[in-house]
């Protein structure tokens, strides 16, 4: 019997292909670790532990108030009663949030059956929901109610106590756990409902490193009043952490400004590239590890290694501000 999968697809390691070797100019850009607190406030994110009660929108509003900033956004709405991991991007960091759509999510859910059921049957039915499933969004949802497919990567029962079932589930973004519980109950023939839900992971962002709103407030006050940035730097992370869930392309300094101005990625600009297929979304990084752009591969990475000319990826989203690196490309 094969070992059960308990890992989100986006976390599986990829082979790195080396096309060439080059250096970076120390006078332009900087490694994410070198950013000042002010720079992080305009291009960082917080792994926030959302409390039960407020909406995700309200939590983001509180973050903006605490940090005295104008712009912030969250990656993946949680219902008011749901707790757990809520990535909140600050300022320009919101540009990177779309990568979380392919990251996958993990939840721990408490489901209550309406009637008693045999443990063996409960485990069999829950296991049958691993893989591609069809769901109808609940009545109170932000999307149009039409049946759609989503993938459940793993579903692990942690405990069964009477009619209460505690389980951990890893799934594609946009999967409704409340609906999943109802569907499990229907298949069991006894009915079921979601009682409590906590999100424990969004891609590589886990609850282990999540911070509370009070933690954020304290860290900001320490920095603002005493100049002590140690705790705030632990709380506000670089947006490059979000990019860890997608394959990477490392490019030359000379390719960066063209991308920032909307150009597609040309093969001569590539230094290193993760193994991937055509059609995949990838993050373009500088040699210093800075997020430059999100692109969609037009060819598999092996062709990028083999060829010396042509376009290898189309631009999806610019992450870096224009002028961070010098413009040494020709406009046509």
Image: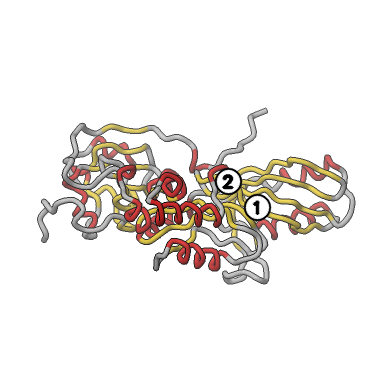
Q: How is the image coloured?
A: secondary structure
Identify the disc placed on residue 231.
none
Report which residue position mark 2 lands on: 207
Secondary structure type for disc 1? strand
Question: Residue, x 62% and y 69% (percent of image)?
Answer: 141
- CA–CA distance in space, label 2 to label 1: 10 Å
Q: Position of residue 12 (x, y in %)?
A: 49, 37
Q: Position of residue 309 (x, y in %)?
A: 18, 44
Residue at coordinates 62% horizontally, 58% vertically from top-left? Answer: 51
Single out the residue that lies furthest toward the front.
226
Q: Residue at x 31, y 53 (%)?
A: 293
- Crowd band around label 2 with a 10 angstrom C-alpha radius: few (<14), some (14–19), many (20+): some
Q: Nearer the viewer, residue 261 or 68?
A: 68
Q: Is residue 217 left or right of residue 15?
A: right
For mark 2, give the secondary structure: helix
Residue 251, image x, y percentages: 24, 43
Looking at the image, can residue 100 be seen?
Answer: yes
Q: Is residue 298 visible?
A: no
Q: Quadrant of residue 3?
A: top right
Q: Where residue 129 sits: x, y (%)?
A: 69, 48
| Residue placed under numbered mark 1 in the picture | 198
Q: Quadrant of the C terminus?
A: bottom left
How many neighbours does mark 1 have within 10 angstroms: few (below 14), some (14-19), or many (20 or more)?
Answer: many
Question: Nearest the camera: 64 or 20?
Answer: 64
Q: Which residue in the rendered view is the most extreme toward the right?
A: 116
Q: Decide: marks 2, 1 in contact (CB < 8 A)?
A: yes
The residue depicted at 33 percent of the width and 49 percent of the height is 297
Q: How many marks?
A: 2
From the viewer's perspective, is 116 left or right of 272?
right
Q: Where the N terminus falls, by quadrant? A: top right
């Amino acid at each position: 019997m094969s070992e059960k999968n308990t890992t989100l697809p986006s976390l599986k390691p990829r082979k790195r292909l080396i096309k060439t070797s080059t250096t970076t100019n120390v006078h332009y850009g900087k490694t994410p670790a070198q950013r000042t607190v002010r720079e992080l406030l305009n291009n960082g994110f917080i792994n926030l532990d959302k409390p039960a009660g407020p909406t995700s929108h309200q939590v983001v509003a509180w973050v903006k108030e605490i940090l005295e900033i104008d712009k912030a956004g969250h990656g993946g709405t949680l219902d008011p009663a749901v707790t757990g991991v809520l990535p909140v991007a600050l300022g320009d960091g919101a540009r990177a949030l779309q990568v979380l759509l392919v990251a996958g999510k993990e939840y721990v859910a408490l489901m209550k059956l309406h009637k008693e059921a045999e443990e063996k049957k409960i485990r069999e039915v829950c296991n049958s929901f691993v893989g591609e499933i069809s769901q109808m969004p609940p009545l109170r949802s932000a999307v149009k109610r039409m049946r759609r497919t989503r993938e459940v990567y793993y579903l692990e029962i942690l405990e069964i106590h009477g009619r209460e079932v505690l389980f951990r589930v890893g799934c594609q973004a946009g999967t409704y756990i409340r609906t999943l519980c109802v569907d499990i109950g229907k298949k069991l023939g006894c009915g079921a409902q979601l009682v409590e839900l906590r999100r424990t992971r969004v891609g590589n962002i886990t609850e282990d490193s999540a911070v509370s709103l009070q933690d954020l407030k304290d860290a900001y006050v320490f920095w603002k009043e005493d100049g002590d940035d140690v705790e705030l730097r632990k709380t506000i992370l670089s947006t490059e952490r979000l990019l860890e869930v997608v394959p990477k392309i490392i490019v030359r300094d000379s390719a960066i400004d063209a991308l920032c101005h909307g150009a597609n990625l040309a093969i001569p600009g590539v230094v290193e590239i993760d193994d991937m297929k055509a059609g995949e979304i990838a993050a373009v990084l500088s040699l210093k590890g800075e997020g430059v752009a999100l692109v969609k591969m037009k060819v598999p990475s092996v062709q990028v290694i083999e060829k010396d000319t042509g376009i290898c990826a189309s631009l999806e989203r610019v992450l870096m501000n224009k002028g961070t690196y010098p413009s040494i490309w020709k406009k046509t």
